Amino acid sequence: MKKSLLLLFILILLSACAKQKVVSQPLQPEVKPVPKEEVVPKEQEKPVQSVQETQIQQKEEAKKASVEEVTPTMIAKAQTTVSDSSSEEVSVLAKMIHFDFDKYDIKKEAAEILKEIADYLKANPDIRLLIEGHCDERGTREYNLQLGMRRAESAKKYLIDLGIDEKRLETISYGKDKPLVDEHNEEAWAKNRRCEFKRIK
């Protein structure tokens, strides 16, 4: 009887150990040590190095390009070209012609300015011009708009007579709406009776 009980106890212990082994076996494959090659992959190091190398190369190329492409001679030439053309245009087209009170005929001084403008337009055939007619503050708005247009058209006709193509010239009247001098005396009125010339872009 004692032997049978002892055998039974041993069998129970063995079966319990067997269960523990069965339970513990599935857990072992899940906990795998990570191989050293996967922890520090070499492929991830290369892009970082290549980006740094690319940035260094780009900086060096930019330095070379700035030295080779932009020389002091080229800068001086560009500045001369821009300043020459802009200063000539400003000096010519910034000039105005003036008129006597309630008149739109071209005076001698105005004729000389219009000749300069015509010469400039002949030398620059791609430029088109807007001629603005202005008046002083006296008289009605409607009358001054008409008078301003007569002044602009008079200047246009003079330029056409000097050989400028009519298609390159446009006219507009502002009447008394845009005074050059905002005062109320004869000197201001004389300055406001004028034509201005603007390049059409």
Image: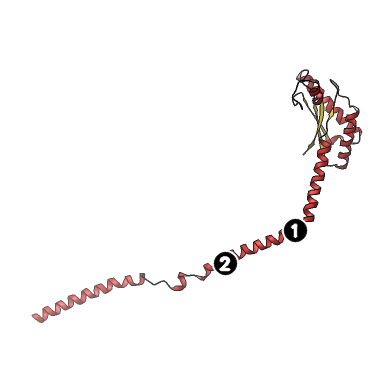
Task: Name the amino acid type tagged 2.
Answer: Gln
* Label 2 sits on residue: 49
Residue 69: numbered disc: 1
Q: Residues within 10 Å of mark 1 (few under 14, many from 20)?
A: few
Question: In this orientation, which residue lies closer to the viewer: 195 or 35?
Answer: 195
Question: In this orientation, which residue lies closer to the viewer: 128 or 70?
Answer: 70
Residue 15: numbered disc: none
> In the rendered view, does 64 fall on the left or right side of 102?
left
Query: Residue 21's x, y, as percent?
Result: 27, 74
- Dot placed on the residue nearer the N-terminal end, 2 or 1: 2
> In the rendered view, does 66 fall on the left or right side of 107?
left
Residue 57 figure quarter: bottom right
Query: Residue 189's x, y, as percent?
Result: 80, 22
Placement of the C terminus among the 4 image quadrants:
top right
Label 1: element kind? helix
Q: CA distance from mark 2 to mark 1?
A: 30 Å
Residue at left 81%, top 27%?
133
Image position of 196 with respect to 122: above or below: above
